[in-house]
Image (cartoon, helix red, strand yellow):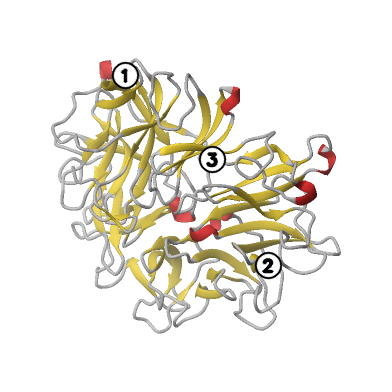
Amino acid sequence: MPSSKLALAVLAAVALPLPSAFAQTVPWQVVAGANADLAIPGFPAGSRSYTDVLLGDVGAGLVGVRMTSPTSAAGYWARRQGTWTRYATTGVAGATEGPGRTGAEAGHTFLSITTGGSGAGADGQRVFIARAGNAADVQNATWGLWRWDTNTNSEVARVLTDGVLGPGLGAGWVFPNDAGFASARMMGGGTMVINADATSPTGATRRMLARHVPGQGNLPCMVRQSTDPALSPGLSAGDSFDAAWGMSALALTPQGKVYGSFSASGSRWGIWEVCNGAPRAVAVNGEPGARGPEIGVSTATFASTSFDTPRPAANGFYFFASYRRVSSETSRLGLFWHDGAANRPLAINDDSGNWGPNWQGTTWRSFTANSLVGAGEYAAFFAQVNTTDGGNPSGLWRVRAGGTPELAALIGLTGDYGPEPNRTWSSFLGRAVLANGDIVVAARTNPGNELALWLLKSGAAPRRLLVAGQTVTIPTTSAGNVQATVNSVSIDDGAALYGGGEDSWAAADGSILVHADIVGYGGVRLLAIPSNPVNLVFRNGFDG
């Protein structure tokens, strides 16, 4: 979860007048709040306090929080189908809110829960890490991973066991007894991806990735330094993955595929599909052909000594990597799309200019590789260009899978790619791209150094989605729905994290979760979901 917060607005009293282009129909709704007068289905009555507020990576209105008061309501809560439910708390046995252990362990309770507000799957199921045991015998309590299936909790992994809850690598292999032994991302149908350390019978520690499947247990996908063909890179006989990795290296797609950026022995780097049989390399350095860059040059290879984390696409993934057309050429950075068969260019300095910036004869000067976000048929990224008259402006581009880059906004310049007449973009902060190509950004603009949440639609003027001074509907217990003024808003800084299957402030379906201070009601969480959902992908975005 990002740690820094971005303040998006100033006090309403000094906010600029709301422009006529503001999207009045964006359906902001209050989903959490501390004020006792707020009527929120399922939330505990009276005043409350909470932390760890996150929107599920798939959206669908799935929000999680850690309730800290009142004491009787403490624990982890999930919002699903419009109402809140507590699913995990300390000191309670059984499966409804406790660890759900059976037999001699039936009286065990959660002693601590380290993660719980995150980890939502598409169907509302969740994964969390906790320590459970007999409260009178804390020394023998154990850490583990649990799955909440929207009704009950069940343990899917446990430290210090090589049985069904272990890493699945054979006799004597166990997860170490540590709170940070694993991290996990929930996928569909109760499956999850687990990134963990495992200890061998001889005491060696190895990083591993596994897929948990209900009824089948934990199925290893890859293991560091293993030469087993089912767990190794498969580029050459006897090779192995030679460096540890984190969850940040992974892309999880809505179709259930898992891709990751890894390094292998023999100075090989690339992107592999994992957890679908043996690891399968799809883009690697030093190799022309199907696993190289498909730029129309038979000698072209990827030159990267590392590949940036891929981002999900409708059929494959997007990624930045360095490449060479011939071995003697200096490497250059480009954006590529793996479509399931080849690594096709989307943004490079090609001879024809097809994959260039497509703005006034400019060429790419540099890309901000870690700015890449992807969803469905579109990706978005920041870049700097060289103009024909010696300038080098920076901006934000979108590109459709199989298409060519389209400029969305330019920093510091007025005109067609500014936010509105006589106003310029100063900087872009929080950002997300929707599956239909819409881009949502938290941006600072001039004059006035104004901060606001904006929507950038292709072929349409930018417009604010949320800004100080706007009124929103507040559900109350005393007076029903009332209109109240937004005093200020904020979101987590940086890119939305749904591309890695991680919960954050924006979701793959276009949902947005923000914190707002409301005059008379204090801090609340506002959720907006775009219109016209189709199979969990909001094709038409915010149509207001």
Q: What residue does disc 3 label?
A: 117
Q: What residue does disc 2 label?
A: 223
CA separation in Å, label 3 and label 2: 28 Å
Amino acid type shown at disc 3: Gly
In the image: residue 477, left or right of residue 68: left
Q: Nearer the viewer, residue 539 or 450?
A: 539
x, y percentage for residue 431? 36, 45
In the image: residue 520, left or right of residue 67: left
CA separation in Å, label 3 and label 1: 30 Å
Is residue 19 positioned above or below 390 on the image? above
Closer to the chain start, of discs 2 and 1, is: 1
x, y percentage for residue 121? 48, 53
x, y percentage for residue 455? 25, 43
Closer to the chain start, of discs 3 and 1, is: 1
Give the residue drawn at x 35%, y 53%. Answer: 381
Dot 1: element: loop
Q: Which residue is the extreme one toward the front?
A: 103
Kindly indicate the quadrant of the structure image that contains residue 169.
bottom right
| Residue 407 at least partly seen | yes
x, y percentage for residue 35? 43, 19
Q: Residues within 10 Å of mark 1 (few under 14, many from 20)?
A: some
Is residue 124 positioned above or below 134 on the image? below
Dot 2: element: strand
Q: Which of 493 and 502 is in front in this view?
A: 502
Q: What residue does disc 1 label?
A: 11
Kindly indicate the quadrant of the structure image that contains residue 491.
top left
| Residue 250 at least partly seen | no
Disc assigned to residue 220: none
In the image: residue 449, left or right of residue 285: left
Amino acid type shown at disc 2: Val
Q: Nearer the viewer, residue 233 or 520?
A: 520
